[in-house]
Amino acid sequence: MENVQSQSAQTRYDKGNLIARSSNQRSGAMKSDEPNPMADELAHLMMQVANNRCKRSFASLFSHFAPKINSFGVQRLSQQGLAMDLVQETMARVWTKAHLYNADKAAVSTWVFTIMRNQCFDMLRKVQHNREDAFGDDIWPLFESDDAENNEEDFLLSANLLQHVEDLPPLQRQVVQGIYMQELTQQELADKLNIPIGTVKSRLRLGLEKLKSFMEKHYD
Amino acid sequence: MINYHPDQHLLSLHAKGELPLSMSIAISAHAELCSHCRQQLNQMTIALSEQEFEQQQTVAEQFDDAGLSGLLDQFMSSTLDNLDTEPTPQPQVVDNTVTIKGEQYALPRVFRKQINASWQGIGKVSRLRLDTGEPQARASLLHIAANGEIPEHTHKGAELTLLLAGEFSDCYNTYKPGDFMLLDQAHQHSPKTTEGCLCYTIVDAPLYFTKGFSKLLNPIGDLLY
């Protein structure tokens, strides 16, 4: 019976695969302090999503969590449409916040649970009090990287900085990229570009000054 | 040393996300000050997540019934790509301090969206109403300046006081920052402070904020249909 169900769910993207495997493992009595292969599998999938933006892994996470989020939502929100919204919002956050997940802080299940609960709290307020405010993430600290917010800012800042590197004049850009992204020494770069090291230094200085002024203008 | 804590029942409702906003703010602020309760909440959250997400499932068949296949297809074909190209919102730096009568206080993070309102008050007692959108409960930050007191009063419903800074005492005890006091209508008290204090308070219609959503709004369908 179970096989038939997971077969039919297993159309594309390995749907149901994880569910079938996890229930096999769970069929024996499993104590919580034993190694938990399902948790390891989820952590692996999460890393694939975070580091490689792997959609296949996301689909497996979706297959595992979506039905459970859906039944949580049906209980809590009493309306099928809203439960689907909860699934959609929660899984969208799993995708966009994947880089903040920290395996040292919590199991994937716990992290996804907090995202779901916080989202559900905000949805309930919308339904009950017609409030569009989002308090969930302020009330419950997420099990994320130590200074998740700072990381997020750094991450954004680097993204912005990279954008500005693209805007530099080509000769300066070449030097900035060589030193900071390919991590060449000034001498290596000079040899590679076949220019004197003094020229590398002066282009680098001009480039960095320009970047600094971009950043000050936009982020002061 | 914090001596007064929310009870297990409140902590567990909070971990489930079933308390109204005003009360969730109080528990969250208390937990930021109290490592003991923070730890308990973490454990409850882990237990809840295991219960929701790791128990044996018979959900394979739900996948298609609930339209989840369609949602997954949508995610794979467009939603994920759209999410990646959406501009990331600029992080907001929110100042988490309030200043009242020349005293500046750093507040727990849960207050950061709410403290733009203005203080009102007479004499030594000032109040900043927080707009939680709940008609049944009034939540505020309450500041009592040094040597101030609140006249003796009783409560129609319950009254929650969470001391955030300073000290105060009433006929029962002396309280320290982090102390979480939930009094019902049977109690009378008149808090006094010598050095001044800042509290978070909720006053409510009878027994509103100590019950979970499920009991209060059963069925919440009443509001939906």
Image (cartoon, coloured by chain):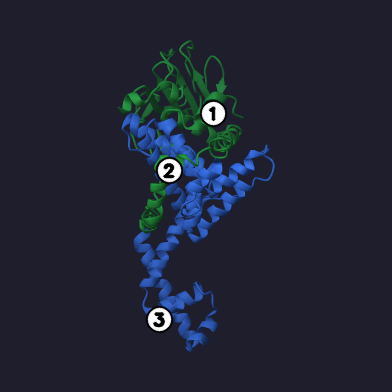
User: In the rendered structure, which amino acid carries the disc numbered 3?
Assistant: Leu
Q: Position of residue B47 (x, y in %)?
A: 59, 35
Q: Relative to A109, does residue B179 appear above or below in the rendering? A: above
In which quadrant of the rendered view does residue A183 lie?
bottom right
> Chain A is shown in which shade?
blue
In the rendered image, the quadrant that contains the C terminus of chain B is: top left
Q: Is residue A209 visible?
A: yes
Secondary structure beneath dot 1 equals helix
Q: Residue at x 50, y 61 (%)?
A: A52
Q: Residues within 10 Å of mark 3 (few under 14, many from 20)?
A: few
Label 1 belongs to which residue?
B12
**Image disc number at residue B64:** 2
User: Chain B shown in which color?
Assistant: green
Tag 2, which secondary structure? helix
Tags 3 and 2 both on a single chain: no
Q: CA distance from mark 1 to mark 3?
A: 61 Å
In the rendered image, which residue does mark 3 sit on?
Answer: A171
Q: Are marks 1 and 3 in contact (CB under 8 Å)?
A: no
